[in-house]
Image (cartoon, rainbow, N blue to C red):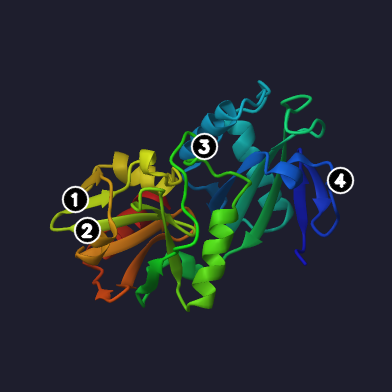
């Protein structure tokens, strides 16, 4: 059981106490979205990109966003919980948003509610993984390619099933495909490959989540060219390197995909750059 407190619409509640009824729309329909963030020494990392993504998602899902839900309010709600739980050093945050109760598929109103949860993180999340990840394709479910495929939806069944598949097959991560058999993303991360001096990741039209580290790498000035490009399984097998990105771990390099093995020279450089520029 989680200890400490969570924040429910700005009110602190003991983390072990229930806050929802059976009419909760996220429980019923997955009607909502979430952000997973990292707080380091009291600072919400990449707060601008997280808030930007959250606002874009809420607009896409037709929420009525209160005027008071500003970026500064978003950040303060997170840091207040970290201080309440004495977790300001290194913390994982889940910021979940869901529509107000009522209605069947068609809601009664579109007001957002939110729950913020916090967990302490081990210092190891700041370090590049020593051993390369073992990965393979999750064959059972394909990710859609539509305007909802890039959001962090409260309906996560494809990723739940992929994570179960990974555990059953002794994988660190399972990679999901879109309906056309091309690469979308992985269980909890975006997928990048290195070929020569160029880095490629699938565009959002291929079905991946719009990850904040992904967006940062595409926008930042780096000693490498980072491009969006559709990726086939063969592209992964023939890559010089593969690495995965998300907000908690930053960059993790892949050591094995099927029968192919990889190094981590580019991942090492990018990890250091992220460490210098974000923390």
- Classify mark 4: residues with Cα within 10 Å, few (<14), some (14-19) or many (20+): few
* Residue designated by label 1: 224
Residue designated by label 2: 194
In three-dimensional space, the C-alpha distance between marks 3 and 4, rounded to whole angstroms, equals 26 Å
Q: Which of 187 and 51 is in front in this view?
A: 187
How far apart are labels 2 and 4 at the CA level? 47 Å
Q: Which of marks 3 and 4 is nearer the N terminus?
A: 4
Measured Cα–Cα span from mark 1 to mark 3: 30 Å
Q: Mark 1 or 2, which is nearer the eye?
A: 2
Q: In this view, does 107 lie to the left or right of 161?
A: right
Whether residue 90 appears in this view of the structure is no
**Considering the numbered disc 4 on the image, is that residue within a helix, a strand or a loop?**
loop
Secondary structure at numbered mark 2: strand
Instruction: Give the residue displayed 48% in from the left and 60% down from the top.
Output: 187
Q: Which residue lies under the disc numbered 3?
A: 148
Which is nearer the N-term, disc 1 or disc 4?
A: 4
Secondary structure at badge 1 equals loop
Q: Position of residue 57 (x, y in %)?
A: 55, 33
Residue 230 image offset from top left, x and y in percent: 28, 46
Tell me, yes or no, if residue 185 can be seen here.
Answer: yes
Q: Do the numbered discs 1 and 2 sit on residues whose CB atoms are within 8 Å? A: yes
Residue nearest the viewer, comparing 138 with 22? 138
Q: Are marks 2 and 4 in contact (CB under 8 Å)?
A: no
- Dot 3 or dot 2, earlier in sequence: 3
| Gap in angstroms between the C-alphas marked 3 and 2 | 28 Å
Measured as percent of width and height from the top left, residue 121 is found at: 57, 65
């Amino acid at each position: 059981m989680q200890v400490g407190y969570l924040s429910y619409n700005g009110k602190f509640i003991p983390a072990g106490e229930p806050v929802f009824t059976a009419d909760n729309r996220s429980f019923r329909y997955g009607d909502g979205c979430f952000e997973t963030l990292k707080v380091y020494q009291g600072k919400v990392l990449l707060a601008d990109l997280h808030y930007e993504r959250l606002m874009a998602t809420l607009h896409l899902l037709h929420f009525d966003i209160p005027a008071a839900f500003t970026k500064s309010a978003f950040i303060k709600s997170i840091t207040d919980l970290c201080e309440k739980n004495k977790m300001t050093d290194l913390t994982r945050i889940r910021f979940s948003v869901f529509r107000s109760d009522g209605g069947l598929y068609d809601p009664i109103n579109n007001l957002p509610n939110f729950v913020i949860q916090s967990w302490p993180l081990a210092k190891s999340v700041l370090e590049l993984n020593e051993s390369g990840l073992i990965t393979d394709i999750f064959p059972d479910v394909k990710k859609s390619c539509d305007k909802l495929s890039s959001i962090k939806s409260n309906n996560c069944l494809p990723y739940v099933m992929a994570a179960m598949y990974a555990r059953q097959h002794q994988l660190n991560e399972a990679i999901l495909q879109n309906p056309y058999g091309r690469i979308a993303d992985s269980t909890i991360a975006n997928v990048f490959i290195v070929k020569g001096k160029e880095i490629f990741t699938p565009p959002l039209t291929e079905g991946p989540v719009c990850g904040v580290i992904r967006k940062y790498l595409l926008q930042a000035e780096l000693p490498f060219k980072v491009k969006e490009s559709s990726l086939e399984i063969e592209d992964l097998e023939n890559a010089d390197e593969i690495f995965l990105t998300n907000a908690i771990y930053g960059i993790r390099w892949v050591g094995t995909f099927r029968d192919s093995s990889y190094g981590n020279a580019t991942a090492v450089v990018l990890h250091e750059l992220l460490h210098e520029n974000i923390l």
